[in-house]
Image (cartoon, coloured by chain):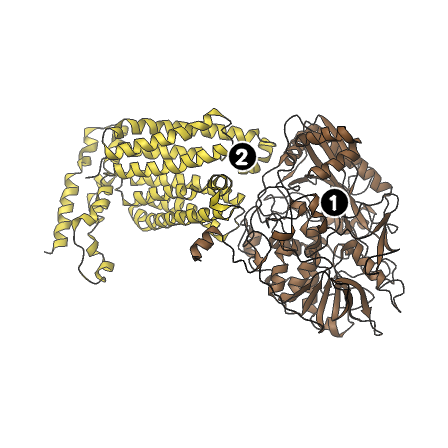
Chain colours: A yellow, B brown
């Protein structure tokens, strides 16, 4: 028996040991505890796929009208709209089946993530092309394409990517299906066999995906939440700056996001803030996003023409979906606080 | 230089000819010298620029003669009201009649790009009814073509400029626009508020040929408000930046500062070439197989009349005595309202919202045809002039009003004035510096026009009041100029046929605003360019037969979308029409 097979058997043993879900129903846990249990164990592929699809729909709508405002003047501007729709389909596939999650959702999510990075580049360049370019960063960031929006758009793709590595909610009932998808060491993949030289055979190469499978990625998720809060908070900062902070409530996301970022970083270093500050500030961000959504909607109706020219006023009024994306950052933080830490 | 840095930070090469902050074209261009060319296009403006581009791309040897300069936009344009006079045709012209037209700033152009350099770039289409107002309303004359014949060219030019506007435009033949709508300035907000209060529909953010997103090597609009002082940003479409660069790359030549004085016709009644004066006052003769006059509504008839010769004693191509007749301007009354809140009218393109709710003939009104209401954005000098006319403001009173400038909004009427034979361009006694007789323009209103203006003006005042203005005043004025070499099917009542070919001379064409038989209440720029693209397609389809025969083939040419400037497709709001074309 070679080394790889031994590793695999070892992994199987670990997986079986760490699955107390077998007795879940018999113990009569109620639904909330069951969800919590699922999260802790990384058995929420369907749920996260759903979340990824929903946030992708939001970002797709947002980028749809924001790029409409930019007149789709470059061909590449069609891609995020098309990809977010594809990602919704991919998330649906991931929701339906394990195979869909790995074979469909994963590549689409990876592609969408790459598109977010590409978009970041084009937005940087768009700012550079404005009069004065990066010599007037604040003016041109306020007036130019939203610099971090493409990366924020990547967050939903990131969620989809994570979902594709998770276990499914009902894996406890079908252990055989689950074990079939245990990640293999890198050198077992046939494409690495083609590489010359010494093959990698360290078991560490599979720890990340193994941890993901088991819901042990709290630090990872906290980092993602911190990034999302930074992107969204920065967007809120310069968009509200553009409006001269006319309403006091416009300060809330600007104040809240650094605090949330700090909580995320603390949660990465230490277990305790992950269960105290992180969920508290994340919940505050979720609520703040909801309030922001209300104010933004009100702002749209108050524009000249109000409800009568709704499409136009959504286009040029306060960005209606942006506060919801700030809420989504809070959701990420909440999710992180419910995970187990990396082994 | 590091290419990534150059790309990212948009550093220029510095060896091209600047047509905006990021657009440049390489000079020198092709030079034909004295040799015979296929086409001479006289006047490189809205129509001339498009024609040059189409013909050059199709492989013809084509030369554009332009009386004004070839602009280097970074150097020559100054974004200043007082400093922009060289954009207009300010050479001597005589004006008269019962309602004499002010000639200059808003109805003429000089220099490559012509009037499209300083137009506000409103680009509504004509309505289908505009093409048959005589059959429908018993006024004016019908066009020799239908809206459907021109429609593909409207769609095509809206992509080539491209035009920003709402996704759904409800009036006339409903359609949507390639680029997204613009954000509103103060005047637009006033128009929306007033119209919404009165239950009038309003089109927001266009249609206007100003980029709402970047387009290739052109920047998008930055809303600094100097549209009609020529757009240094390169966001506003002018043929100088949309069609001329591709024309030059395709092998056309443009001779700027070249004032054409006469078109020559031989004994076989065919055009042989043109005489022109260069910038030093030296006269040249340029041989051509065919000539297209694109000098706009005053210079085109002036040139034809000045080219009178044996066989054309009344002026070239003037056997019908309609050259110079049926000149039309549009009613352009500006209504100004003072608001308690700041409006800051200058902070937007002048053209960004309009309503065509009153465009069509309404049996409840006592006049035929209708009008549009549009935003305008007078800068301080124009505003001072309007206030002087509207309120008699002068001295300290004018100074106080000027200090109040930011509280005033302006919207304007754009009303259809019908074609009348006595509104015309003739030759005056006076001569210009080359010794060429100048134009004398006579203009007057008729009963229908006056009723329309009165009704329209009051409607605009009503909208301004409904928007909440504390004080409303108005200035009577006119905008645009079309007609004076109109097209038609009957050689006895028109100068050119529906492709712009003169009825009298087989290789002489007219293609510009002067061939419009009627004008509707739409700004003429888009229609002029659409007609030019259509004439271009016709000439290309006819090929050599234009040069060799007097045969007049009236077959409708197929639209040549492949001759559009590069980068026309694959951009803009996804629409089914885009995908299928």
Can residue A206 be seen from the camera position used here?
yes
Q: Nearer the viewer, residue A71 or B377?
A: B377
Mark 2 vs mark 1, foreground winner is 2
Left or right for A60, reference B290: left
Is residue B524 at least partly visible in the picture?
Answer: no
Report the quarter where the N terminus of chain A lies. bottom left
User: Disc count in the image?
Assistant: 2
Please name whichever residue, B502 or B115, is drawn nearer the observer in this view of the structure.
B115
Residue B542 place in picture, x, y as percent? 70, 69
Q: Which residue is mark 2?
A: A317
Residue shown at the point (46%, 49%) measured from the top left: A125
User: Can you say whether B211 is above or below B465 in the image?
Assistant: below
Of the 4 image quadrants, the one containing the C terminus of chain A is top left
Q: Which mark is residue B34?
A: none
Residue beneath disc 1: B521
| SS at mark 2 in the image | loop
Per the image, label 1 sits on a secondary structure element best described as: loop
Residue at mark 2 to residue at mark 1: CA–CA distance: 31 Å
Residue A12 x %, y %: 15, 46
Specify the subunit that label 1 lies on. B
- Left or right, A44 with respect to B300, comes to left
Quarter location, residue B265: bottom right
Binning the other alpha carbons within 10 Å of mark 1 as few (below 14), some (14 to 19) or many (20 upward) gives many
Q: Residue at x 73, y 27 (%)?
A: B471
Whether residue B261 is situated above or below residue B238 in the rendered picture = below
């Amino acid at each position: 028996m070679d080394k790889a097979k031994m590793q695999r058997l070892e992994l199987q043993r670990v997986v079986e040991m760490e699955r107390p879900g077998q007795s879940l129903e018999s113990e009569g846990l109620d639904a909330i505890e069951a969800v919590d249990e699922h999260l802790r164990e990384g058995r929420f592929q369907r749920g996260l796929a759903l979340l990824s699809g929903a946030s992708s729909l939001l970002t797709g709508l947002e980028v749809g009208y924001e790029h409409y405002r930019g007149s789709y003047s470059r061909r590449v501007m069609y891609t995020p709209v098309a990809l977010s729709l594809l990602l919704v389909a991919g998330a649906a596939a991931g929701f339906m089946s394990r195979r869909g999650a790995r074979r469909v959702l994963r590549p689409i999510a990876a592609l969408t993530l790459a598109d977010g990075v590409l978009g970041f580049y084009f937005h940087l360049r768009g700012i550079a092309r404005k009069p004065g370019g990066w010599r007037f960063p604040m003016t041109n960031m306020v007036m130019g394409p939203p610099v971090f929006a493409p990366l924020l758009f990547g967050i939903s793709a990131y969620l989809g990517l994570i979902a594709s590595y998770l276990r499914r909610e009902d894996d406890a009932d079908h252990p055989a299906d689950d074990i079939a998808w245990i990640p293999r060491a890198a050198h077992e993949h046939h494409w690495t066999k083609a590489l010359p030289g010494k093959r990698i055979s360290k078991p560490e190469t599979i720890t990340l995906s193994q941890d993901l499978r088991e819901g042990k990625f709290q630090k990872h998720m906290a980092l993602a939440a911190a990034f999302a809060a930074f992107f969204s908070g920065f967007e809120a900062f310069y968009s509200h700056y553009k409006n001269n902070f006319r309403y006091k409530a416009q300060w809330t996301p600007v104040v809240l996001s650094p605090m949330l970022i700090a909580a995320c970083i603390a949660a990465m270093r230490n277990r305790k803030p992950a269960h105290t500050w992180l969920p508290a500030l994340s919940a505050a961000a979720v609520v703040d996003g909801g309030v922001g959504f209300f104010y933004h909607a009100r702002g749209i109706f108050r524009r000249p023409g109000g409800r009568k020219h709704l499409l136009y006023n959504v286009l040029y009024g306060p960005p209606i979906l942006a506060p919801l994306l700030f809420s989504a950052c809070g959701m990420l933080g909440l999710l992180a606080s419910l995970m187990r830490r990396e082994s | 230089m590091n290419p990534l840095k150059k790309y990212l930070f948009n550093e220029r090469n510095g060896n091209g000819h600047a047509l905006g902050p990021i657009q440049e074209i390489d000079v020198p261009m092709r030079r034909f010298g004295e040799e015979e060319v296929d086409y001479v296009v006289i006047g490189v403006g809205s129509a001339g620029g498009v024609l040059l581009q189409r013909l050059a791309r199709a492989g013809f040897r084509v030369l554009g003669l332009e009386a004004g300069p070839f602009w280097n936009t970074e150097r020559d344009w100054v974004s200043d009201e007082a400093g922009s006079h060289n954009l207009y045709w300010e050479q001597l012209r005589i004006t008269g009649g019962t309602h004499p037209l002010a000639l200059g700033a808003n109805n003429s152009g000089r220099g490559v790009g012509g009037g499209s350099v300083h137009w506000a770039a409103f680009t509504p289409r004509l309505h289908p009814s505009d093409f048959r107002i005589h059959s429908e309303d018993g006024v004016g004359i019908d066009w020799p073509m239908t809206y459907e014949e021109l429609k593909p060219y409207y769609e095509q030019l809206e992509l080539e400029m491209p035009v920003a506007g709402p996704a759904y435009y409800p009036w006339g033949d409903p359609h949507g626009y390639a680029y997204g709508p613009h954000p509103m300035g103060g005047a637009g907000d006033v128009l929306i508020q007033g119209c919404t209060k009165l239950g009038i529909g309003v089109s927001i953010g266009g249609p206007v040929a100003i980029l709402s997103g970047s387009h290739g090597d052109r920047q998008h609009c930055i809303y600094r408000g100097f549209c009609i002082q020529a757009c240094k940003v390169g966001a506003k479409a002018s043929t100088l930046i949309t069609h001329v660069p591709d024309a030059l790359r395709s092998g056309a030549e443009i001779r700027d500062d070249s004032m054409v004085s006469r078109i020559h016709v031989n004994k076989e009644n065919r055009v042989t070439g043109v005489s022109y004066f260069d910038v030093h006052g030296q006269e040249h003769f340029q041989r051509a197989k065919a000539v297209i006059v694109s000098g706009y509504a005053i210079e085109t008839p002036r040139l034809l009349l000045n080219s009178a010769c044996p066989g054309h004693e009344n002026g070239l191509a003037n056997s019908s005595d309609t050259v110079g007749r049926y000149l039309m301007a549009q009613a352009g009354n500006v209504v100004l309202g003072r608001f308690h809140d700041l409006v800051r009218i200058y902070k937007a393109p002048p053209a960004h919202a309009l309503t065509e709710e009153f465009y069509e003939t309404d049996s409840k009104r006592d006049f035929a045809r209708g009008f549009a209401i549009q935003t305008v954005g007078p800068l301080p000098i124009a505003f001072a002039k309007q206030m002087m006319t509207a309120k008699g403001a002068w001295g300290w009173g004018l100074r106080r009003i000027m200090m109040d400038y930011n509280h005033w909004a302006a919207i304007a009427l754009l009303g259809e004035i019908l074609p009348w034979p006595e509104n015309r361009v003739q030759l005056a006694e006076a001569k210009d510096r080359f010794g060429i007789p100048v134009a004398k323009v006579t203009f007057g209103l008729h009963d229908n026009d006056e009723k329309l203006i009165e009704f329209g003006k009051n409607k605009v005042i009503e909208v301004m009041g409904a928007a909440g203005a504390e004080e409303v005043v108005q200035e009577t004025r006119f905008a645009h100029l079309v007609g004076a070499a109109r097209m038609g099917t009957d050689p006895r009542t028109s100068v050119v046929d529906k492709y712009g070919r003169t009825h009298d001379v087989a290789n002489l064409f007219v293609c510009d605003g002067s061939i419009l038989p009627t004008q509707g209440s739409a700004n003429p720029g888009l229609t002029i360019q659409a007609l030019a693209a259509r004439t271009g397609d016709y000439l290309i389809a006819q090929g050599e037969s234009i040069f060799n025969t007097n045969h007049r083939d009236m077959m409708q040419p197929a639209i040549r979308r492949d001759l559009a400037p590069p980068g026309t497709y694959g951009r803009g709001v996804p629409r089914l029409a885009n995908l299928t074309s």
